[in-house]
C-alpha cells in the first residue's frame, strides 16, 4: 500500500508539474502577442506625434514671426530643412534660402552642406530677411517613406 501511495504521489506531482509548465507557456505566448500589439500601437502613436509638430505648417498661411520660430526650432534637426522665399528676394533665378539641410522637392537631401546661419533671416538689409509681420504660405515636403523632410515658406 505504501508503494501505491508513493506512486500516486509521484504521478500527481508529475501531472501538476506538467500542468504548471503548460499554464506558464500559454501565459508567455499570450503576453508575447500583447507585447507585439502594444509595440505596433506605440510605434503608430510615435509617428503621429512626430508629424503633429508639422501639421501647423501643412498648407497654411503663417506670419513671418512663425517662420522665424520654425527656423529656430527646426534648423538643427538632422536630415531636415526649411526653405524660405521672401518678398524682398525678387531676382528671377533666386531659389530662396535653405536653413538646415538642403532638401529637394522629392524630400531627398540634395547635398551634405548645411546652413545653420539663422541670423540671415533676421538682418533687415538682406534679401533673405523674414519680416515678422509678413504672410507666408507654408507647405511640407515629404519623402517616399512619408517622412516630413522640409517646410517651405513662400511670402505672399
Image (cartoon, rainbow, N blue to C red):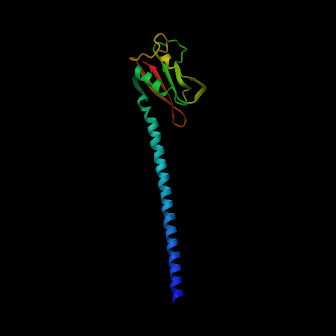
Task: Say which of 17 and 63 sits in front.
Answer: 17
Please determine whether, in this image, residue 10 is positioned above or below residue 2: above
Left/right of residue 85 with respect to residue 135 in the rendered view: right
Please tell me whether residue 44 is drawn above or below residue 59 in the rendered image.
Answer: below
Residue 91 appears at what percent x and percent y?
A: 52, 12
Residue sitting at the far bottom:
1
Give the side of residue 63 with respect to residue 117, left or right: left
Corner quadrant of residue 124: top left
Q: In which quarter of the view is residue 135 placed?
A: top left
The one nearer the camera, 14 or 112, is 14
Instruction: Tell me the residue at 46%/22% (across/down).
Output: 153
Q: Residue at x 49, y 69 (%)?
A: 20
Q: Residue at x 50, y 71 (%)?
A: 19
- Where residue 12 appears, as percent x and y from the top left, is 50, 78
- Give the farthest residue toward the right: 112
Task: Please state the horizontal and vertical placement of residue 33, each as a whole percent of the image.
Answer: 49, 56
103 relative to 132, above or below: below
Q: Is residue 111 left or right of residue 129?
A: right
Query: Residue 43's x, y, as percent?
Result: 48, 44
- Of all residues, the one furthest to the front in this rendering is 2
In this rendering, is residue 117 above or below 56? above
Amino acid at each position: 500500500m505504501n508503494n501505491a501511495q508513493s506512486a500516486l504521489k509521484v504521478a500527481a506531482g508529475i501531472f501538476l508539474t506538467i500542468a504548471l509548465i503548460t499554464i506558464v507557456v500559454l501565459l508567455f505566448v499570450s503576453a508575447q502577442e500583447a507585447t507585439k500589439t502594444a509595440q505596433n500601437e506605440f510605434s503608430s502613436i510615435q509617428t503621429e506625434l512626430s508629424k503633429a509638430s508639422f501639421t501647423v505648417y501643412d498648407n497654411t498661411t503663417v506670419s513671418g514671426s512663425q517662420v522665424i520660430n520654425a527656423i529656430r526650432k527646426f534648423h538643427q534637426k538632422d536630415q531636415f530643412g526649411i526653405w524660405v522665399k521672401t518678398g524682398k528676394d525678387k531676382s528671377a533665378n533666386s531659389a530662396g534660402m535653405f536653413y538646415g539641410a538642403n532638401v529637394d522637392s522629392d524630400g531627398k537631401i540634395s547635398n551634405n552642406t548645411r546652413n545653420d546661419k539663422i541670423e540671415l533671416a533676421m538682418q533687415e538689409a538682406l534679401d533673405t530677411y523674414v519680416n515678422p509681420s509678413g504672410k507666408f504660405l507654408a507647405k511640407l515636403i515629404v519623402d517616399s517613406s512619408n517622412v516630413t523632410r522640409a517646410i517651405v515658406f513662400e511670402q505672399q
